[in-house]
Image: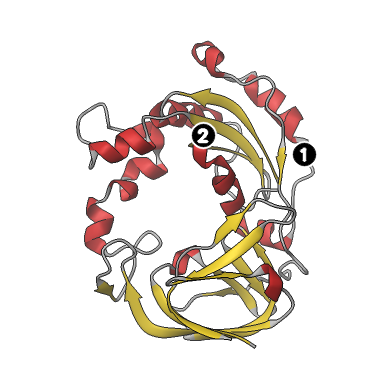
């Protein structure tokens, strides 16, 4: 089977294991069925902005052209630093976006992917967020009314815990053996009194299992279509937004907007 078109980030469905789907234009292929088989991906030397469709030579922030990167609210600095949200200051790039995405309940959570990290996510987007990060366990610790308030709490807790995933350790299966509930109990003791009404007491741990035959080797080869136009290898696993091949790993989300040809051999 062979398909070609514009690549989108991996979509997934929570299951045991998680079901992953490769999206190329209108095609949506379940990748779990191809574990252990050979796949060839060829870059067709064409990139289109995932928002406006403009043909570009280089993408920004996982698929945007430069003008969309500079003007769209989803690419503002406050998305990666939510404690700097400026919606209430009247300078949001798009107030309707802010209403939908930021002025809604957010979780501050713990996730175990490489080590236990602290993060935040919209309450309605939590499962997707945790899977995209390659978490094997997650648990919300607080629910706050807005993204800014969640960002301020996350920023405070990042003094005690990392707020980023070590993707290399995550793909090699090098996972900390820390007990996430013990970490939750400890980190909750650092939360200032003003956040006490938002602390969640009885949230259960969510667990995730990924479709993996073999983890990445000790020395990970990161493949990018900016340096090579073709990848051919045996699919060993899928975790986060990564495809694990016997020849290296490919971050699909990073290549959103790239036009490719995919052949399942």
- SS of the residue under disc 1: loop
The residue that mark 1 highlights is 178
**What quarter of the picture does the N terminus occupy?**
bottom right
Q: Is residue 98 left or right of residue 178?
A: left
Quarter of the C terminus within the rendering: bottom right
Q: Tell me which corner region of the image, top left, top right, bottom left or bottom right, holds residue 235.
A: bottom right
Rendering quarter of residue 93: top left
Disc 2 is placed on an element classified as helix
Q: Position of residue 125 (x, y in %)?
A: 51, 42
Q: Residue at x 22, y 27 (%)?
A: 89
**Above-or-below relation of 1 to 34:** below
What's the CA distance linking mark 1 and mark 2? 25 Å
Q: Nearer the viewer, mark 1 or mark 2?
A: 2
Q: Residue at x 64, y 25 (%)?
A: 187
Residue 90 locus on image (x, y percent): 20, 30
Residue 53 numbered mark, or none: none
**Residue 197 image position (x, y, % from top left):** 54, 13
């Amino acid at each position: 089977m062979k398909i070609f078109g514009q690549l989108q980030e991996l979509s997934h469905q929570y299951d045991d294991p998680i079901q992953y789907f490769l999206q190329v234009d209108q095609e949506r292929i379940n990748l779990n069925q191809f574990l252990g088989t050979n796949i060839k991906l060829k870059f067709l030397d064409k990139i289109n902005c995932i928002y406006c469709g403009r043909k570009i030579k280089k993408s920004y922030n996982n698929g945007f052209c430069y003008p969309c990167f500079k003007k769209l609210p989803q690419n503002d600095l406050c998305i990666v630093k939510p404690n700097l949200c400026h919606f209430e200051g009247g300078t949001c790039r798009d107030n309707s976006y802010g209403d939908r995405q930021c002025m809604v309940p957010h979780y501050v959570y713990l996730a175990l992917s490489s080590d236990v990290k602290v993060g935040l996510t919209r309450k309605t987007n939590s499962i997707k967020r945790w899977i995209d990060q390659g978490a094997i366990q997650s648990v919300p610790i607080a629910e706050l009314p807005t993204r800014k308030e969640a960002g301020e709490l996350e920023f405070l807790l990042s003094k005690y815990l990392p707020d980023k995933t070590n993707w290399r350790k995550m793909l090699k299966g090098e996972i900390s053996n820390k007990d996430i509930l013990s970490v939750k109990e400890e980190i909750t003791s650092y939360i200032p009194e003003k956040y006490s009404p938002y602390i969640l007491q009885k949230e259960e741990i969510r667990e995730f299992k990924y479709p993996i035959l073999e983890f990445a080797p000790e020395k990970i080869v990161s493949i990018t279509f900016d340096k090579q136009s073709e990848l051919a290898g045996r699919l060993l696993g899928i975790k986060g937004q990564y495809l694990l091949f016997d020849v290296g790993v490919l971050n699909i989300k990073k290549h959103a907007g790239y036009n490719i040809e995919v052949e399942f051999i």
